[in-house]
Image (spheres, coloured by chain):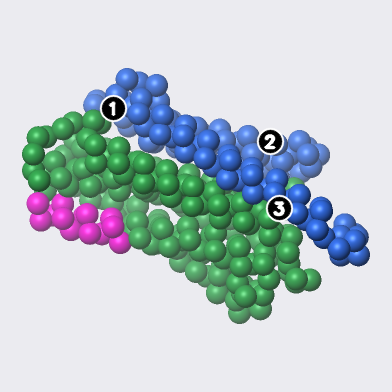
Chain colours: A blue, B green
């Protein structure tokens, strides 16, 4: 692996990560957009920084020799989506169906 | 065990370690899910908005991100056997990582001293568990780096020490990736 090529890869990854970090921070601290858009925006920035670091730091990509790394990563993402999404769905369902009415009313007022 | 010398990219040990790192991601994912479920269970006490400071979180983020970058440089210089640069970048990476841990311990101590310890609410229990687990991983990574640096001094860059450094750098990058989500979901989201 070429030294200069790798060095450039790390520098670009670092620069992109800094960009995403400051963009998310700036957007939140200055309240540039209304809440709902802001939430999606910073989650998108996080996903963007994740991809940048995966590609430029960890060298996970479509290049031939790393195929299996990408396949394993995809599998892990599937598991994570099921675990996190499923947890949120179930817990929200339980809270909605089993919460005493007076407690729910109190929490809604928070 | 010396066996055949495989190129780092095709080394099964490296792939096996990557699979371990992915399983660690699943652990963090479940800690995130728990935090998401419990983040408003503040037991009438302080919540995220009251406790967390975005500038402080930004500082921690920049420190860890830079250490991930310099860790990559340490890896790169080791691979090309530029020994003096390798040790320099290793020391820089370690210092940044130690600074990050110091700041985090400081934040935890402050919360506990002010009565916002992990025992005061479900929100704080899940916060301390999620962020604390990440911090423990960082501490482990720092200890590992010291051990690898010593091994490199003793044996130089061999197939084995280079492979161990490769595994370490994967681990270190993964820690910054997890932190991206801690920064976004724990520290930024409540301020929206």
Q: Circle 2 — which element?
A: helix
Region rendered in magenta: B143-155
User: In the rendering, which numbered label is found on residue A79?
Assistant: none
Question: Quadrant where the N terminus of chain A lies?
Answer: top left
Q: Chain of mark 1?
A: A
User: In the rendering, which numbered label is found on residue A41?
Assistant: 2
Q: Which residue does the image show at 37% across and 32% down from the upper left? A: A69
Q: Earlier in the sequence, mark 1 or mark 2?
A: 1
Q: Quadrant of residue A6?
A: top left
Q: Earlier in the sequence, mark 3 or mark 2?
A: 2
Q: Residues within 10 Å of mark 2 (few under 14, many from 20)?
A: some
Most foreground residue, B177 or B5: B5
Q: Which residue does the image show at 28% across and 51% down from the upper left? A: B90
Q: Chain of mark 2?
A: A
Find the distance from the CA under tag 3 to the CA under tag 2: 25 Å
Q: Which residue is mark 1?
A: A4
Q: Which residue does the image show at 35% across and 52% down from the upper left? A: B93
Discs 3, 2: same chain: yes
Viewer-side label of 3, 2? 3
Residue B144 in the magenta stretch? The answer is yes
Most foreground residue, B180 or B29: B29
Looking at the image, residue B114 lies above or below residue B15: below
Viewer-side label of 1, 2? 2
Q: Which residue is mark 3?
A: A91
Whole-percent x and y of residue B75?
27, 42
Most foreground residue, B57 or B171: B171
Q: Residues within 10 Å of mark 3 (few under 14, many from 20)?
A: some
Q: Earlier in the sequence, mark 1 or mark 3?
A: 1
| Residue B55 falls left or right of residue B50 | left
Q: Main secondary structure of the magenta part?
A: helix
């Amino acid at each position: 692996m070429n030294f200069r090529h790798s060095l450039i890869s790390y520098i670009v990854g670092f620069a992109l990560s800094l960009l995403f970090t400051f963009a998310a921070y700036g957007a939140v601290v200055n309240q540039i957009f209304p809440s709902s858009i802001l939430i999606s925006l910073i989650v998108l920035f996080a996903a963007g920084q994740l991809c940048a670091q995966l590609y430029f730091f960890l060298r996970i990509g479509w290049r031939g020799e790393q195929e299996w790394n990408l396949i394993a990563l995809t599998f892990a993402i599937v598991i994570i989506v099921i675990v996190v999404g499923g947890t949120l769905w179930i817990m929200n369902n339980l809270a909605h169906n089993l919460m005493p009415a007076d407690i729910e009313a109190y929490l809604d007022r928070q | 065990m010396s066996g055949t010398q495989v190129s780092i990219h095709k080394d099964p040990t490296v792939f096996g370690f990557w699979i371990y790192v992915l399983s660690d991601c699943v652990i963090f994912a479940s800690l995130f899910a728990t935090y998401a479920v419990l983040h408003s269970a503040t037991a009438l006490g302080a919540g995220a908005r009251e406790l967390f400071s975005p500038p402080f979180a930004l500082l921690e983020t920049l420190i860890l991100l830079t250490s991930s970058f310099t860790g990559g440089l340490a890896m790169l210089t080791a691979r090309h056997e530029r020994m003096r640069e390798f040790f320099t970048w290793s020391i820089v990476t370690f210092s940044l990582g130690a600074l990050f841990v110091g700041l985090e311990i400081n934040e935890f101590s402050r919360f506990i001293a002010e009565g916002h310890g992990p025992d005061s609410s479900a929100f704080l229990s899940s916060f301390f568990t999620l962020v604390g687990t990440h911090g423990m991983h960082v501490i482990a990574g720092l200890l590992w780096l010291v051990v690898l640096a010593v091994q490199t001094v003793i044996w130089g860059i061999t197939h084995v020490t280079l492979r161990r450094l490769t595994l370490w750098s994967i681990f270190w990058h993964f820690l910054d990736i997890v932190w991206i989500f801690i920064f976004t979901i724990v520290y930024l989201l409540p301020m929206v």
